[in-house]
Every structure is written in C-alpha cells, then in structure tokens.
Image (spheres, helix red, strand yellow):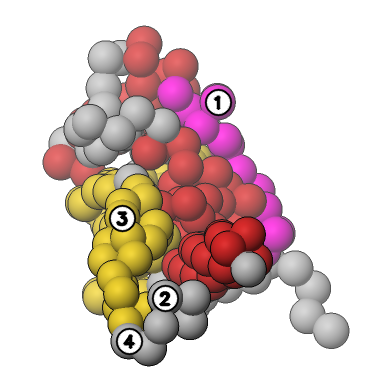
Amino acid sequence: MHRRLIHSRIFFWASLLAIQLLAAGCFYKLHLGEVDDPPAGLKSLQPIALLPIRDFPGYPESGSILVTPVQELLVKKGWSLLRPSQTSPVLEEFELRPQDLLADPSSLMKVNRRLPAKLFLVGTILEYRVDKSFIRGQDFPVWDVGSGPGYEYWSLPTYHPGTCQMMLRLSLLDPERGSVIWKAEGRISGPSNAMNELAEKLVEGLLAKFPSCLPQP
C-alpha cells in the first residue's frame, strides 16, 4: 500500500509537470503598430538589398534570428535579393551601420554605387528580452488517502515558462529619393523556447501587405 501511494504521488507530479510544459508553449501575442501600405509600382524596383540586422545589446544572434525570416519570406514572395552576406562586407568596408543609411543620404548613395540595388531594406530591433524558464517547488493541498481523512501539503515541482519579447521596425529606402518610402513596426511576445517561431510570426505580420512578385493564378 505504501509503495502504491509513492507511485501514485510520482505519477501525479509527473502528470502535473507535463501539463504545465505543454500549456506553456502554445500561446503568443502579436501587436502590429504602424504598418504602411506599399507604394504603387514597388514590384518594378528590384533587386532589394537586405541589410544585416544588428544584434540588440546583450543578446548576440538576435539580429540573425530576425533577419533570416525576412530573407526567407521575401524569397517566397518572388523578390530578387542582395542578401545580408552580400551587403554586410560593403557596410564594413565603409565602416557604416545599417541605420547610418537611414540618417545620411550621402552614405546611402555611397553604398548604392557598390550595390546596384533599387531598394534597401533596413531592420531595427527596438526591443528584445528573454527570460529563461525554470522549475521551482510549490506547496499544494492534496487529499491523502493513505493517512486518513484530511489534506496535507506536498511540495510539487511547478514549471514557470520563460518568456521572450521582441519588437522590430522594417524601413524600405529608395536610394534615388534618399528617403524611406515604406515602414512597418510590430511587437510579439511568447515562450522563450520558441524564439525562431516568434520571429517568423512577427515578420509574417510586418510583411503581410508586401506585394508578391510571383505570377498570380
């Protein structure tokens, strides 16, 4: 009887923890802020030079986590791209950051002489925060059939899911005008064990209105 009670407690703890783990990875919140309508005739301006996204302070690889779905989605939409692997060496040569092209038209023109692109897409991480998940004991009242009527308190493992929040702005530059012609901004939050999926959902929202260059059925 005592051994059966121990097995029942172990099964209860494991089941409770499994339910918490499954529930933690299912939800995200997406909020789109300012998302412009793309200007007319945008599809004729190709290729797009996709600039690397700089890491948010304290979070190495945050830039690559966000720039990868941008690149993949534009390719799926049929856009001709100069990828970050092509644009990054030119920025390094001129000792420029991607955001410098937003603030200084002369820098944009300088880079455009080396990168024959009709448009430049700049991503800026406005917010990025990751809180890791952890497991901690917590007291729960449990009906104990092995010790007579009444409740006793068990210290059960409780899963506290980690969270991730990221905010991204995409700016499209026309080098001939030297100005931003399209902009989209949004924020997403969800479980920290799904950062890549969150980045994909955020980028899908930001580029939802961006036109496809593929033949329409």
- Residue that numbered label 3 is attached to: 137
* Type of the residue with mark 2: Ser
Query: In 3D space, how far apart are the residues under numbered discs 1 and 4 (Cα atoms)?
Result: 66 Å
Question: In the image, what residue occupies the spot 21% across and 52% down?
Answer: 127
From what the image shows, is residue 44 above or below residue 59?
A: below
Name the residue type under label 3.
Answer: Gly
Q: Nearer the viewer, mark 1 or mark 4?
A: 4
Callout in the foreground (3, 2): 2
* Distance from the alpha carbon under mark 3 to that under mark 2: 22 Å
Q: Nearer the viewer, residue 98 or 162?
A: 162
Q: Mark 2 and mark 3 in contact (Cβ < 8 Å)? A: no
Residue beneath disc 1: 85
Extreme-right residue of the structure: 217
Nearest to N terminus: mark 1 or mark 4:
1
Taking depth in this image into account, of 27 and 118 the one nearest to the observer is 27
Q: Earlier in the sequence, mark 1 or mark 2?
A: 1
| Numbered disc in front, either 1 or 3 | 3
Give the extent of the magenta segment.
75-88
Q: Using the numbered discs, state the Cα–Cα distance from disc 4 to disc 2 in whole angstroms.
A: 8 Å
Q: Which residue is mark 4?
A: 150
Q: Nearer the viewer, residue 30 or 86?
A: 30
Instruction: Return the disc, 1 or 3, that comes first in the chain's sequence.
Output: 1
Residue denoted by label 2: 147
Image quadrant holding the C terminus, namely bottom right
Could you give the CA–CA distance between mark 4 and mark 3, rounded to whole angstroms? 22 Å
Residue that lies at the very extreme toward the left in this rendered image: 103
